[in-house]
Image (cartoon, rainbow, N blue to C red):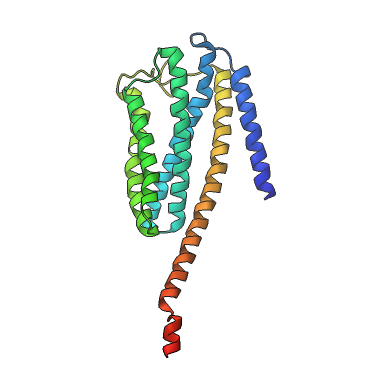
Amino acid sequence: MKLRVALTAVAAALVIYAGYAALFVAPDERTMHEVQRIFYFHLPAWINSFTAFAIVFVANIAYLATRRPKWDALGVAAAEVGVAACSIGLITGPLWARPVWGIWWTWDARLTTTFILWLLYVSYLLLRGLIEDPQRRASLSAVFGIFAFLDVPLVYMSNRLWRTQHPQPVILGGQGSGLDPTMAKVLLVCVIAMFGVMLLVLTDRYRLERLRYELDELRQTMETRRLDSPSASEKGGM
């Protein structure tokens, strides 16, 4: 418990410092100026989102291979974290785009594939809510989750494969790409801060899902015993 409180305090301190660094430490960008500071929240949100969806992908494969409930629990926990991070990315993107591009949204390859990605994982979560049987729910959602992950590399490569409203990658984009050293350090702090928050939320959500499994198993056991045991009238007739 004490470790959990300490980790939460560290994550909170990192988030506060990351926000301060993004607003006051990072240098001014010469073309976009102040609005560019959204970048320090926008990009970490997408890094967290892709990381969470990768965890879903691995957990879904592991569940189909082992049928262990812990992998299904990890998959749904990571999916919820990924959808939250993806939603932050989709909100901060238009806020950045409007003053820079003059539009809130355009249906180019990057934005369209990203919106489809968000819809796929929202559908993954909705699918789980429509199926009552735990094993069938886990199996079907695992298959769907593996399919949904196919859109992640497509989103990442979209502005490399097609001409989009997004510019060519600033990081890992080849010759001429890169960040100012101070910008890179601030971005790293923001990524670490948001990643820490993601891990805390993910572990809590995972524990909750495991408790749900235990509760479902207890309910099934009680229901089986109730059906198998003779009723009070039958006992009296005997």
Tell which residue pokes out farthest to the top in this image.
Answer: 30
- 16 or 180, nearer to the observer: 16
Q: Is residue 112 left or right of residue 220?
A: left
Residue 3 locus on image (x, y percent) = 67, 47
Q: Is residue 177 visible?
A: no
- 72 or 88, nearer to the observer: 88
Q: Residue at x 36, y 49 (%)?
A: 141
Q: Is residue 73 visible?
A: yes
Residue 199 locus on image (x, y percent) = 55, 42
Q: Where on the picture, by quarter, is residue 158?
A: top left
Q: Residue at x 57, y 38 (%)?
A: 197
- The vertical placement of 203 against 91, above or below, is below
Residue 116 locus on image (x, y percent) = 34, 33
For the C terminus, the quadrant is: bottom left
Q: Where on the picture, by quarter, is residue 7?
A: top right
- The vertical placement of 207 against 18, above or below, is below
Residue 127 locus on image (x, y percent) = 36, 47
Tell which residue pokes out farthest to the right in this image.
Answer: 2
Query: Total marks drawn?
Result: 0
Q: Is residue 141 left or right of residue 188?
A: left
Tell which residue pokes out farthest to the left in this image.
Answer: 162
- The vertical placement of 138 against 105, above or below, is below
Q: Where on the picture, by quarter, is residue 135?
A: bottom left
Q: Residue at x 43, y 24 (%)?
A: 172
Q: Residue at x 53, y 39 (%)?
A: 198
- The vertical placement of 3 against 20, above or below, is below
